[in-house]
């Protein structure tokens, strides 16, 4: 199946806005969760680049990234009396669905990681991984649909970026050169 056909079929189960709009308190929690997910992603990306790409691992840098996840502004914006941040969010139904799908994508990425983490114990099941990867694909397709971009365009842009970045294919050496040049 090609990407655009998948996107079209996946969109059959996508709603374009929530049944009821989220309250400001709900949006504050959802946005804080997205911020936390972004910080978790930064720590995971650091581990991937420092170890898998061989950029060099520094335990202090990982500790710094992990500490950022625990800072006060990531406490779901709850004050000491339990009241949520008071802010009026002016988000369309489409914007709220983008938040919903971003949260879904983060959760499903975690499920992919959880499934693969079972590998050393022999509990890894490829059928489970296929299901979780499919859920990730659904959220990617949903976000593409919500922003009005064909999934094939996103895929092509990624291939173009990778081709430019790694003209002769991936290597840790080229990855380090790219980071050093920044």
Image (cartoon, rainbow, N blue to C red):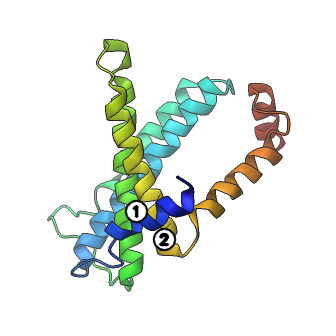
Residue underneath mark 1: 10
Q: How many marks?
A: 2
Residue at horizontal 40 percent and vertical 47 percent from the top = 134
Residue at horizontal 24 percent and vertical 71 percent from the top = 26
What mark, if any, has residue 145 been given in the picture? 2
How packed mark 2 is, by other alpha carbons closer than 10 Å (few <14, some 14-19, many 20 or more), is: some
Q: Is residue 140 above or below residue 90?
A: above
Q: Is residue 173 left or right of residue 56?
A: right
Residue 11 lies in what quarter of the image?
bottom left
Tags 2 and 1 touching, CB below 8 Å:
yes
Upstream in sequence: badge 2 or badge 1: 1
Q: Is residue 151 left or right of residue 83?
A: right
Q: Estimate the spatial distance between the alpha carbons at disc 2 and disc 1, rounded to whole Å.
A: 9 Å
Place of residue 124 in the rendered image (x, y in percent of width and height, measured from the top left): 33, 22
User: Which residue in the rendered view is the most extreme toward the top?
Assistant: 121
**SS class, disc 1:** helix
Can you see residue 149?
A: yes
Place of residue 100 in the rendered image (x, y in percent of width and height, measured from the top left): 34, 65
Judging depth in this view, the residue of 160 and 182 nearest the camera is 160
User: Which residue in the rendered view is the most extreme toward the left?
Assistant: 81
What mark, if any, has residue 136 been given in the picture? none
Place of residue 17 in the rendered image (x, y in percent of width and height, measured from the top left): 32, 79
Judging depth in this view, the residue of 151 and 92 nearest the camera is 151
Judging depth in this view, the residue of 66 and 17 nearest the camera is 17
Can you see residue 114?
A: no
Residue 171 lies in what quarter of the image?
top right
Residue at horizontal 79 percent and vertical 33 percent from the top = 169
Q: Is residue 88 left or right of residue 39?
A: left
Judging depth in this view, the residue of 155 and 171 nearest the camera is 155
Q: Is residue 112 above or below residue 86?
A: above
**SS class, disc 2:** helix
How packed mark 1 is, by other alpha carbons closer than 10 Å (few <14, some 14-19, many 20 or more), is: some
């Amino acid at each position: 199946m090609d990407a655009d056909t998948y996107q079209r079929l996946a969109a059959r189960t996508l709603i374009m806005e929530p049944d009821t709009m989220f309250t400001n308190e709900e949006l504050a929690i959802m946005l804080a969760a997205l911020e936390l997910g972004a910080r978790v992603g930064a720590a995971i990306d650091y581990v991937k680049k420092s170890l898998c790409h061989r950029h060099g691992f520094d335990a202090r840098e990982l500790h710094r990234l992990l500490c950022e996840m625990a800072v006060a502004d990531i406490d779901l914006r709850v004050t000491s009396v339990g009241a949520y941040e008071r802010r009026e969010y002016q988000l369309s139904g489409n914007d709220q669905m983008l938040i919903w799908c971003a949260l879904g994508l983060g959760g499903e990425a975690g499920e992919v990681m959880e499934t693969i983490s079972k590998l050393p114990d022999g509990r890894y099941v490829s059928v489970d991984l296929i299901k979780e990867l499919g859920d990730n694909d659904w959220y990617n397709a949903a976000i593409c649909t919500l922003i009005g971009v064909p999934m094939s365009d996103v895929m092509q842009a990624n291939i173009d970026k990778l081709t430019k970045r790694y003209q002769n294919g991936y290597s840790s050496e080229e990855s380090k050169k790219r980071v050093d040049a920044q």
